[in-house]
Image: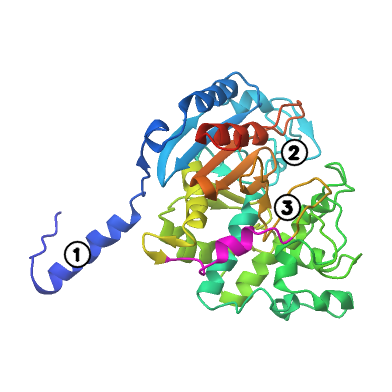
Amino acid sequence: MKTLYRASGIGAALLLSMLTSVAAQQPVQWKRSTPADQSLAAAPINDLIARIRAGNFGNVDRLVIVRNGDLVVSETFERDYGAISRGRKSAIGCGVDACANASDVHAFNYLHPDWHPYIKGRRVHTLQSVTKSVTSAVIGAAIQQQKIRNVQTPLLSFFDQYDLTRVDARLRKATLADLLTMRTGIEWHESDRPLDDTNTTIQLERSADWIRFTLSQPMDAEPGAKWVYNSGGSQLMSEVIRRATGMHADAYAERFLFGPLGIRDYYWKKTPTGHPDTEGGLYLEAEDLARIGQLFLNDGVWNGQRVLPAGWARESTARHVQHITPNGPGYGYQWWRYDRRGTEMWAGNGFGGQFLLVMPQHRIVAVVNSWNVFGAPTQGILGPLIDTLITATGAGG
């Protein structure tokens, strides 16, 4: 049965409200263009795409390039992860026909195609540690909404609902900035260990309470004194957001970050305590992830709406850690700095080949999704991607 609304009074207002609501739920599309129309040389980009198709960089799934706010490349490379994962088993999971029990197929099984790299047949792709960069942006949104005063707020002030009696006294000096820059002083063995039981992040993901697990770790430095890659610290951001806003990070992001950007579809894995996995659990479609990069290019403004504080993009991508190793990249608030050939590079970087790359001087955002986790060695795509983009602009010598 059809219901008829008269175009007057309450009926007209209700109809307008319904139409506005429907319109708000429609996917927001990028304006499409070409590399040439945005003053990018097509040849180096086409060469990179050809090398991806030839398998030079392993299992690359998506490549997206945006310049000047226009989508100039959006390529999908179809992979049969059922076949790729078949019979494979390692410390991080089991693939098709390799799991001993149905219970082995779960959200933290990184080899099974039910969960990775796409979730249950959807087109949202695992971001792994690019999740950290996005969650840092959610903290920026909470500062914009005046739920968090600033990054100098004492870290443990967000954890007053936890038993902190056994926490190392040095951690009480840590600030939110120390957390964001991975300099809390908490001892953590992730990048210096194989993916086995000795790896602290493997232990974290097998624990019943990721936040309590992280807070229970010993300290090996004063806050601010030492950079150590620490996914447990990134997980603490989930409680920072919950305590500050009264909402879990996924719900808060949906309202104050994804919503304004027109991101309608996402998946965010949960930990055993119901917190979103803010160290690696977010899934987004590549064109939607590019919106996060474009927001940073726009100093936190999207379609005239301020989403992040003025200056937050620059502050959070600055080299707060100049070099994580003598010749290594810099680090900001859960963002990497891969500057090359005189060009600034802000980046989110995730396990398996996930990259969100922002080149502010050239108004470029690029996204790569891959899933190189099956043990076969492959050439990394980050360096070739950076070189391709710089060459395409005609900059960098």
Residue 38 is covered by the magenta coloring: no
Single out the mark in the foreground, 2 or 1.
1
* CA distance for labels 2 and 1: 50 Å
Residue 313 is covered by the magenta coloring: yes
- Report helix, strand or loop for mark 1: helix
Say which label, 3 or 1, has the lower sequence index: 1
Badge 1, how many Cα within 10 Å: few under 14, some, many 20+?
Answer: few
* CA distance for labels 3 and 1: 50 Å
Residue 174's mark? none
Badge 2, how many Cα within 10 Å: few under 14, some, many 20+?
Answer: some
Left or right of residue 21, residue 254 in this image: right
Say which label, 2 or 3, has the lower sequence index: 2
Going 63% across and 28% down the picture, which residue do you hit?
Answer: 59
Region of the chain picked out in magenta, as a range = 306-320
Tell me the kind of residue under disc 3. Answer: Gly
Q: Is residue 252 visible?
A: yes
Residue 241: where, in percent of width, then height?
61, 70
- Report helix, strand or loop for mark 3: strand
Residue 223: where, in percent of width, then height?
83, 70
Residue that carries the numbered disc 3 in the rendered image? 330
Tell me the kind of residue under disc 1. Answer: Leu
* CA distance for labels 2 and 3: 31 Å
- Report helix, strand or loop for mark 2: strand
Say which label, 2 or 1, has the lower sequence index: 1
Residue 93's mark? 2
